[in-house]
Image (cartoon, grey):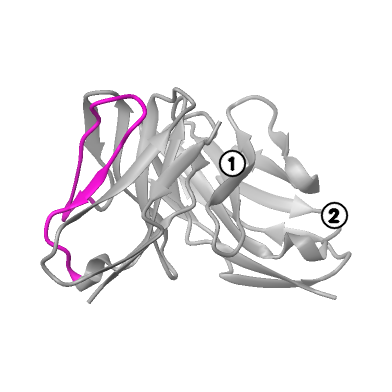
């Protein structure tokens, strides 16, 4: 069975500081990897995705993620946090025809 | 385009009642799926469909039925609601599993 692990259910950063949200996956075959963001009382929106092209993937709102096969990781980063980045972030893996989501990381940005 | 729409937005059921959660998309996506979101559990896949007439079970299918008679619609049926089915339900669609999934706004379900 596939699994996605997000380390840290809550992360707090100061405005302007680096954002680092961790995601590790287990997959027996090369997966497709995604990061989604969820704002309160809304559905999920795609931030970025990895589909076996460049290992460094750039997404919307200044976010990027690096696929590291040796570490089975797909961590999400943003150089400078903005207040509007406060939300829930989900890492997801697609293998076969199914998607597997992590349990989410709630990001708080402190002014 | 309306994208992915879900109805109703809120629903309260009594244990044992049945209901259907509606999901529709107007993007001609082949892949559609249903998830439930529970605190601390992330999103878990209930059922999915890779095209009209084709459905399959996800991670947590028990207590739910689906059908896909058209490309646009993918209803989720609760045959006999249980308190454990209290959750927020999201429908999503995409061109394929490697493509971006577009999510609906969700349905909040409370089973008493």
> Which range of residues does the magenta coloring cover?
B61-82
The residue carrying pointer 2 sits among few (fewer than 14), some (14 to 19) or many (20 or more) residues within 10 Å by Cα, namely few
A24 in relation to B98, above or below: below
B13 vs B31, left or right, is: left
The image quadrant that residue A107 belongs to is: bottom right
- The chain holding disc 2 is A
Residue B70 falls inside the magenta stretch: yes
Q: What residue appears at the point 70 percent right and 44 percent down from the top-left corner?
A: A65
Residue B80, position in %: x, y? 11, 61
Residue A67 rendering spot, x and y as whole percentages: 64, 39
Decide which of B12, A48 is in the foreground and name it. B12
In the rendered image, which residue does mark 1 sit on?
Answer: A70
Secondary structure beneath label 1: helix
Residue at 41% in and 42% down: A99
* Visible residue check, residue A72: yes
Residue A111: x and y in percent read 85, 76
**In this view, B71 is above or below B64:** above
Residue A80: say if magenta.
Answer: no
Residue at the location (44% across, 35% down)?
B93
Q: Is residue A98 visible?
A: no
Separation (CA) of disc 1 from disc 2: 24 Å
The secondary element bearing badge 2 is classed as: loop
Q: What label sits on residue A79 in the rendered view? A: 2
């Amino acid at each position: 069975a596939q699994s996605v692990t997000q380390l840290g259910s809550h992360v707090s950063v100061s405005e302007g500081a680096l954002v680092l949200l961790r995601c590790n996956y287990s997959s027996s075959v090369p997966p497709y990897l995604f990061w989604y963001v969820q704002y309160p009382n809304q559905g999920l929106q795609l931030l970025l995705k990895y589909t076996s092209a460049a290992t460094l993937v750039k997404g919307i709102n200044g976010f990027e993620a690096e696929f590291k096969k040796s570490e089975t990781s797909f961590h999400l980063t943003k150089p400078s946090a903005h207040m509007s980045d406060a939300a829930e972030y989900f890492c997801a893996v697609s293998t076969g025809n199914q998607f597997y989501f992590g349990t989410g990381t709630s990001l708080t940005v402190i002014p | 385009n309306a994208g992915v729409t879900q109805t109703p937005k809120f629903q309260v059921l009594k244990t044992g009642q049945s209901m259907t959660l509606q999901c529709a998309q107007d993007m001609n996506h082949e892949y559609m799926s249903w998830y439930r979101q529970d605190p601390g559990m992330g999103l878990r896949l209930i059922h999915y469909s890779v095209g009209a007439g084709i459905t399959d079970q996800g991670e947590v299918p028990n207590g739910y039925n689906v059908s896909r008679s058209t490309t646009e619609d993918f209803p989720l049926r609760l045959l006999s609601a249980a308190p454990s089915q209290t959750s927020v339900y999201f429908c999503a669609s995409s061109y394929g599993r490697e493509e971006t999934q577009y999510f609906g706004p969700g349905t909040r379900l409370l089973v008493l």
